[in-house]
Amino acid sequence: MSLINYVTRIHFADEVLEHALDAELEEMGVLSPLILWDGAGARKELLQRLELALPRRLRPQTFHLGDAGASEETALQAAATYRDGGCDGLIAVGGAPAIHLSRVVGVCVSHPGPLQDYLDCHGGLARIGNVLPPLIAVPTTAGSGSEASDTAVVALADGGCAALASPYLVPRVIICDPTLTLDMEERATASTGMEAFAYCVETFIGTAFNPPADALAGDGLRRAFLHLEQAVMEGQNLDARREMMSAALNGSLAQQKGLGALQAMSNALVSCGGRQTDKGALCAVLLPLALEFNAPAAGERYPEIRRQLVLSETADLGEAVVRLREGIGLPSRLSELGIDDAMITKAAGFAATDHANRTNPRKAGPGDYLAIMRAAL
């Protein structure tokens, strides 16, 4: 975690999509991009807007993820579409599923052999080379934290989940246009916004030394905490949407510092049967308990968080998160998300070995994670 690398080209402005797409595709020399789209039918106008923004000289292909998300099977299907269409670049449009899948597809079409050879748990970091097709990420949510990261989480054909990790997986360009989030429903706004807030908190208290990430995370957690409820309640408020997209980008950029217990538990629960579980809702339930667990080791960071959140010096951070959670209507118990004791018993061991556990402020083992998740059940 000693490398500090910020990070890639980022366009951030209202209505920037059209100009940025044209300019960047021309710069890259891409003529036939594959568009990976994870949006539901209710948001089809966003895909239409992007397709209209593409220069007429291009020969684009479009791949709809549907409900499959970033799975190994879907990646192989999209890779076949890429090859059959003679594609030479990728555009990921949507939230985490599209952006994660685009990275997996990039590896599949540029590296020989099975996908398993490139999983991080199999030493894949050393095998992924700088030969991936150019990737443009266009987030249409504000919070998944996936746009600027260097990892891709993929659901494997055998039922498990694993990650690819490499600096070459970072998109060549990110286009952040807050107007692309104006149509988000209240629940999606609340969930992705809570995810952005949680990523900023976790990176801010993480153990790695990365001052730029600390600054980004501190700014991001403030923006998210102060504007999330407004974005949920006033969906057409562009100022609030802009603040939330800023917070999400900050959290994504800061993640190279490393995350912590919350991410470890979320990844583990998704791997142990909760593949369709809302990660923002998991953050809403588990963040107060993670803050309480980490207080003995990260307490010196908490006064600065209180200052950023405009709280009193004695305010309980967990209670502040609970109030935010209640204000935006997110669940308070894991059981409300369909998670049971059998799942958390299995997930506890996975969480302890997750890469995010390495930078958690307080050492956590399977027993610690089991206790936290049982308290949230």
Image: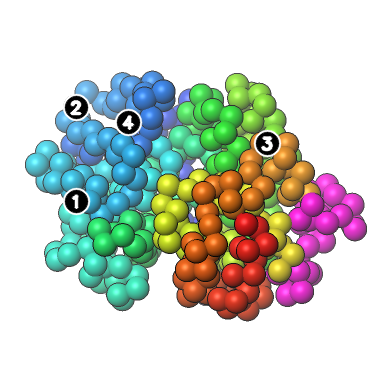
Q: Does residue 196 appear in the picture of this structure?
A: no
Secondary structure under badge 2?
loop
Q: Main secondary structure of the magenta part?
A: helix
Task: Compare marks 2 and 1 and give the one earlier in the sequence.
Answer: 2
Front in this rendered view, residue 53 or 180: 180
Q: Amino acid at mark 1?
A: Leu
Q: Which residue is mark 2?
A: 57
Secondary structure under badge 1?
helix
Residue depicted at x 30% and y 68%? 119
Q: Position of residue 70 (x, y in %)?
A: 33, 49
Does the magenta-highlighted stretch encompass residue 148? no
Q: Give the number of the mark in front: 4 or 3.
A: 3
Q: Which residue is mark 4?
A: 22
Q: Amino acid at mark 3?
A: Ile
Task: Compare marks 4 and 3 and give the one earlier in the sequence.
Answer: 4
Task: Compare marks 3 and 1 and give the one earlier in the sequence.
Answer: 1
| In the image, residue 305 above or below residue 278 | below
Could you give the CA–CA distance between mark 2 and mark 4, rounded to whole angstroms?
10 Å
Q: Which residue is mark 1?
A: 76
Secondary structure under badge 3?
helix
Could you give the CA–CA distance between mark 4 and mark 3, rounded to whole angstroms?
37 Å
The stretch of residues the image draws in magenta is 294-319
Q: Which residue is mark 3?
A: 328
Front in this rendered view, residue 252 or 79: 79
